[in-house]
Image: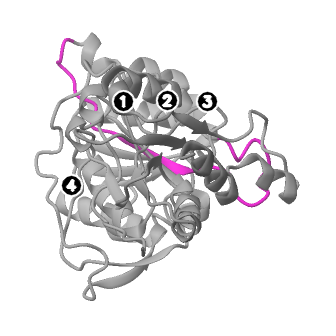
Amino acid sequence: MAASIQSLCAPSSFSTTKSIDSKRFHGRKVGLLEVRSDNRTKCGSMPVRCKTGNLVTHAVASPAAASTASSKTGHEVLLFEALREGLDEEMERDSRVCVMGEDVGHYGGSYKVTKGLAPKYGDLRVVDTPIAENSFTGMGIGAAMTGLRPVIEGMNMGFLLLAFNQISNNCGMLHYTSGGQFTIPVVIRGPGGVGRQLGAEHSQRLESYFQSIPGIQMVACSTPYNAKGLMKAAIRSENPVILFEHVLLYNLKERIPDEEYVLSLEEAEMVRPGEHVTILTYSRMRYHVMQAAKTLVNKGYDPESGMRTGGIGASLTAAINENFNDYLDAPIVCLSSQDVPTPYAGTLEEWTVVQPAQIVTAVEQLCR
């Protein structure tokens, strides 16, 4: 059976009750396999968050569904170009949208996501900052409190650890601690994940760090189509949103619609329907799972793949066991990266990341 990809929307909400639709499991039993997108924690990959009290519900009013990216119409873009399109369109649409970060101005960003925006919108809306993540992250949060909609770029997501206090104590909590007087419509985005021999400091996966902060939404793009749609949705959201971009997906090419579309921050994408096992993953690991799915189909299995972003497997496992334990035919299996700093050596680096063969083996053991 050929794998079918529905390019709808990749992320989900952080509410446990909303993240899993019990109707999909009614009347049939399934096995669940969680595959983390190269995260060091022993976990799964569906974003489940119980701390939703600080979020503005339905923050994006119109997550309008657009025609799928597989349409013959439209234009081809690389993923980083799709991010730029979404950002450019929102800056043109709303004068409150601004960009700040290291080298985001006339240099165009470390991965050229902001290329051409400074000449078009000026240095007051595309702000080159010093190398001081805590300072410009705090500046962006303050700007959001006063009515702007900043997009903060971290040159590498690992560097945002320097701004963890601002992200946690300010960005995530101010809507609550101010009694709703302030909303923080800020987007924090940038590259992360295991690249090609970038070393331990530049290969960190911080989803597990940020998922524990109440009041913050997290999404991760995996295709040019959902990269653009999620960028636009994140900018329009009244909540602070962290957008994770995998460094190895920037040059991924896809045809996207010419007409405007905005995706939902509160839904997941069904990548491939199936019957025997459900695989939950996100970001770059999507492609490892799809590669494994082709092998499994040839062996007579019919895996179902769903994209979910930014969660911790312990939370996901607890939510599934709590809500759908009676529907499971087998225990939940978690695959994750090795709990070690990412090595520089290429062969060792590859060993730390979940590979398609491991997914195939896990599914075969699960379905026995």
Residue at 51%, 67% (x, y): give it: 297
Decide if residue 134 is on the left or right side of residue 120. right
Give the CA distance from mark 4 to mark 1: 24 Å
Residue at 26%, 46% (x, y): give it: 267
Density class for disc 2 (Cα within 10 Å; few <14, some 14-19, many ≥20) is some
Q: Earlier in the sequence, mark 2 or mark 4?
A: 4
Density class for disc 4 (Cα within 10 Å; few <14, some 14-19, many ≥20) is few
The residue lying furthest to the left in this view is 61
Residue located beneath label 1 in the image: 216
**Dot 1: what SS?**
loop
Q: Earlier in the sequence, mark 4 or mark 1?
A: 4
On screen, residue 35 above or below 245: above
Residue located beneath label 2 in the image: 210
Report the magenta residues as a range: 179-204
Tell me, for residue 162, which label it has, or none: 3
Can the viewer see residue 250? yes
Q: Amino acid at mark 4?
A: Ser
Give the CA distance from mark 2 to mark 4: 29 Å
